Image (cartoon, rainbow, N blue to C red):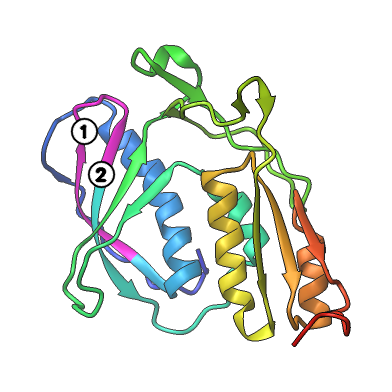
Amino acid sequence: LPQNATPIPNTFGIQGIRHPRRKECAKQCFQELSLDEWYQDNSQPSVKHVYALPNDFQCVLTFKRIPLDNWVSAPSVEQWMQRRFRHVVRVDPVDLQDSETLWKALCNFPCQNNTQCPRGVNCVGRQPSDIPPTISTQPKTCQKQKPATAKRRGKKNDMVIVSGANSDYFTGLENLVISAKYWGPEFKLAIYNLGLTADQVATVKGWHNVTLHWPDGIPDTYPS
C-alpha cells in the first residue's frame, strides 16, 4: 500500500464458524483486498467481521470502503495482476451509492500442500508469467478443481476470446483481459486495434498469450 496512507483500524470480529485457521485466512485475504481497493478505487478496506464457511477451505471478510486521504498513483496493470494472490473473489453489494454499505470478499485458505486442504480440494499456486516483474508460485491456496474445459471429443479446445477497442476504451479492454486471464487462463485472446495509441499498442503487445490484430489500426480496405 502507499506509504503515506493513513492506517485504518480493523476489527476482526468473531462471527459464524470459529475455524482454527480463520484468522490465517483473513490475514492473507486482507493483503490482497487492500491491493485491490487501492488499485481500483483509491480506498482502503476497514474490516468489520471475519467468518469461515462450512466447506472448510474458505473465509469471508465483511468490510467498509474508506477513501484514501489523497490520490495515490496505483500500480500498473501488470504489477497488480502479478501481485494478486489470485484467490480472492469479491461479493459486491447491490447498492453502490450507499457510503455505509458493507462489502464482502470471499477468500480461500492459504496452504503449502494438499494435506492442509479438505478432501476434493487441492493446494494450488499462481500461474507463471513472463511479464516483468515475474511472479513465483507462492502463495498457494486451497482451490476446488474446475471442470475440465480443455478437451472436447478428444480434441484440444481452441476457443479464442476476441475483443477490440480504441484509445477511449482502453481501460475497459485492460479489465476484460484481466478478468479473462483470471477466470480462463487456458484461453487465448485476440485483440483488434480500433484506434489505440502507440503506447497502448506497445502495452497490448507485451501481454502474455494475447495476439494483437491490425497493429497499425483499422485497414483502409475494411468497409466503413
Q: Residue 45's image quarter?
A: bottom left
Instruction: Please give the residue where the numbered disc 1 appears in the rendered image.
Output: 53
Residue 53 included in the magenta stretch of the image? yes
Residue 20 lies, in percent from the top left, at 23, 25
Mark 1 crowdedness (10 Å alpha carbons): few <14, some 14-19, many ≥20: some
Residue 43 lies, in percent from the top left, at 39, 72
Q: Nearer the viewer, residue 79 or 175?
A: 175
Instruction: Please give the residue where the numbered disc 2 appears in the rendered image.
Output: 60
Horizontal arrangement in the rendering, residue 44 relative to residue 80 (left or right): left
Specify whether residue 13 is in view.
Answer: yes
Amino acid type shown at disc 1: Leu
Please tell me whether residue 148 is drawn above or below residue 83 in the rendered image. Answer: above
What span is in magenta?
45-59
Q: Residue at x 45, y 41 (%)?
A: 87
Q: Residue 50's image quarter?
A: top left
From mark 2 to mark 1, how far is it between C-alphas? 7 Å
Outermost residue, front side: 223
Residue 44 included in the magenta stretch of the image? no
Residue 145 lies, in percent from the top left, at 46, 25
Q: Residue at x 38, y 15 (%)?
A: 120
Q: Quadrant of the C terminus?
A: bottom right
Outermost residue, left side: 15
The answer to the question of whether label 2 and label 1 lie on touching residues, with beta carbons closer than 8 A, is: yes
Mark 2 crowdedness (10 Å alpha carbons): few <14, some 14-19, many ≥20: many
Predominant secondary structure, magenta span: strand
Horizontal arrangement in the rendering, residue 124 relative to residue 118 (left or right): right
Q: Nearer the viewer, residue 30 or 201?
A: 201
Please tell me whether residue 219 is drawn above or below residue 209 in the rendered image. Answer: below
